[in-house]
Image (tube, rainbow, N blue to C red):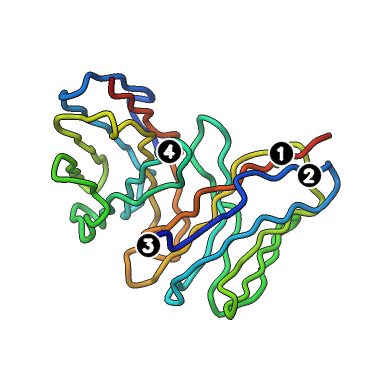
Amino acid sequence: GAGVSQSPSNKVTEKGKDVELRCDPISGHTALYWYRQSLGQGLEFLIYFQGNSAPDKSGLPSDRFSAERTGGSVSTLTIQRTQQEDSAVYLCASSFSLAKNIQYFGAGTRLSVL
Amino acid sequence: DQQVKQNSPSLSVQEGRISILNCDYTNSMFDYFLWYKKYPAEGPTFLISISSIKDKNEDGRFTVFLNKSAKHLSLHIVPSQPGDSAVYFCAAIMDNQGGKLIFGQGTELSVKP
């Protein structure tokens, strides 16, 4: 497809379970970003990738959160031992390169932790 | 520490009139400011940006103004249309931080026919 694709679009899980969220960026985009939007809040930066490396993981809320990107393309965000406060919309964006470039967002994964 | 703030959670405007959305920031090191628009169940889409060395950028019905001394920017939409009804996010970026966007909380604009 032409845009950023995220899957699943919705995920309901039980507290304590692990979840994996997937992001397929626009072809040719070297930079990939993860953000989350909690209810009533703005978008909060989590992590970004330049190629396969993640120079800035400063936004990850805890060590239960991790992300990887392989082949300079698809990225997965993993949340271990989910908690109710992890419930949010997780958004992925990609851009042609770092900084000053427009970031194109996917529609997000809505995560609900019961 | 909220570096980018949108103090109005909502704004209602009549079709054809001007919509003015405001944004304040605290960090003078930001290099670019951007506005994104978001419809429900969709990701944000880029609308317009401005470099910190400019004070105005215009694109069709959309104009962004930057007042660096006041650490304030605003987005003007003229004339407003019902299809402009969405949540608008202000965001800021520093060149040396890899393109990480710092977002405000968003303002929900409603344009009434």
Within 10 Å of disc 3 (Cα), the crowding (few <14, some 14-19, many 20+) is: many
Instruction: Determine the CA span between mark 4 and mark 2.
Output: 29 Å
Label 3 resides on the chain identified as B
Distance from disc 1 to disc 2, alpha carbons, whole Å, reads 6 Å
Task: Determine whether the residue tagged by mark 1 lies in a helix, strand or loop.
Answer: strand
B27 on left or right of A79: right
How many C-alpha atoms fall within 10 Å of the one at disc 2: few (<14), some, or many (≥20)? some
Closer to the N terminus: mark 1 or mark 2?
Answer: 2
Mark 4 touches mark 2? (CB < 8 Å): no
Q: Which residue is mark 2?
A: B13
At numbered mark 3, what does the secondary structure look like: helix, strand or loop? Answer: loop
Chain name for mark 1:
B
Q: Quadrant of residue B93?
A: bottom left
Relative vertical location of residue A25 with respect to residue A55 in this rendering, above or below: above
What residue sits 22% from the left and 30% below the top? A83
- Assign a secondary structure to mark 2: strand
* Subunit bearing disc 4: A
Q: Position of residue A23 (x, y in %)?
A: 31, 37
At 62% from the left and 42% from the top, the residue drawn is B108
Could you tell me which secondary element the residue under label 4 belongs to? loop
Q: Is residue A89 above or below residue A96?
A: above
Q: Which residue corresponds to mark 4?
A: A106
The kind of residue tagged 2 is Val
Q: Are marks 3 and 4 in contact (CB under 8 Å)?
A: no
